[in-house]
Amino acid sequence: MISEETTSITNFSNEDLIENYLSYYDHSIQSVKMRKTSLKTFFHKDNYGFDKHIKELTTIELKHYFSWLKKQPVTLNTKTNKWRILKSFIESVKEDFPDFYLVFPRRNLNWGNQHKKPWKKEYLTKEELKKLLDYFKTTNYKRYLIFRVLAETGMRKGGITYIKLNSIDFDKRTIEVIEKNNQSLPNVYYFSKNLGIHLKMYVDQIKQMNEKVEYLFFSKFMGEYKPYSSRRFNTILDETCEKIGIEKNITCHTFRRSLNNFRDRMGCDLMNRKILLNHKINDVNYQSYTRKDYDKFIKLYDKYYPFYDLNL
């Protein structure tokens, strides 16, 4: 952490400055990942590749980056987010270091019209959901479990890779997971008895490894078990939908949105839908609410479980 005694920006690397920027503000896990990715677009050699210390950054260099970013095959929203986050990072550094002065381009910027089309808000039908899960079930069992957990719980993408083995209660059919950095209590999600059978078999296989594995979905890197990266999830869904003939832009959030839609059609009221999805609700500490009224909400989950007829 940068202290008040700090006098010169050159005492810190670009990486140090980025970490300080990310830790200073109250961001969700997903927001931190997005900001890291956006700044990586500017600094990493495989992207724009600014390889000098930020002290040497100039307004002309920023304009060159803008011209480069403008040509990238991504949506306009992605471009403007990356530009906005870089500006936010630079302004944060300027606040901390009096010896760092940089004028960010102030004129209205012309992004042009050569952009990838943005994804629409899509919903999965039950038939499409079953088609997806059936494909993963026969080709990649880990992916089957990941996307089935998303489909049945409505969990956010940023939370699923941080599910710990000891946070799953198979008797109560609950998963507790921290999805945001500022949470004092984890969110509680419920799952079906059938999914519980699949998860239990998977967890038992992990335990038979006799390794120090902390997370439900993990990968091994440099001899250590770490949370499985969610970076490619949306790409995997995109590629799979093309293979099996689903002509929609499906993302991880589509599962959450679709589950909420299914429950709405079944008659589940708005307040209960929000609590089941761990939405923020004014004046309600929903984490405590779901613990205190467990019996009520597991019955509610089962009542408005929309997939009994699918044999997932």
Image (cartoon, rainbow, N blue to C red):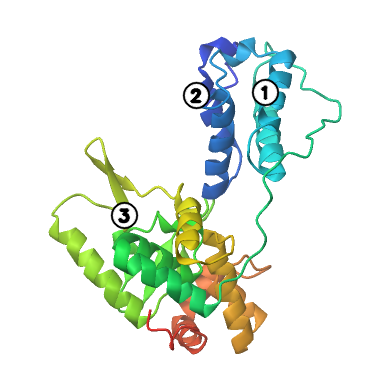
| First-in-chain label (2 vs 3) | 2
Mark 3: amino acid: Tyr
Let me know if residue 178 appears in the view.
no
Q: In the visual, does 142 lie left or right of 267?
A: left
Mark 2: amino acid: Glu
Q: Badge 1, how many Cα within 10 Å: few under 14, some, many 20+?
A: some
Q: Could you give the CA–CA distance between mark 2 and mark 3, rounded to whole angstroms?
A: 27 Å
Let me know if residue 177 appears in the view.
yes
Foreground label between 1 and 3: 1
Q: Residue at x 28, y 77 (%)?
A: 197
Q: In the visual, does 168 lie left or right of 93?
A: left
Q: Write down the residue under mark 2.
A: 15
Q: Residue at x 21, y 38 (%)?
A: 223
Residue 31 percent across, percent down from the top left? 58, 46
Q: Write down the residue under mark 1.
A: 65
Residue 191 percent across, percent down from the top left? 40, 76
Please state, as top left, top right, bottom left or bottom right, where the C terminus lies in the image. bottom left
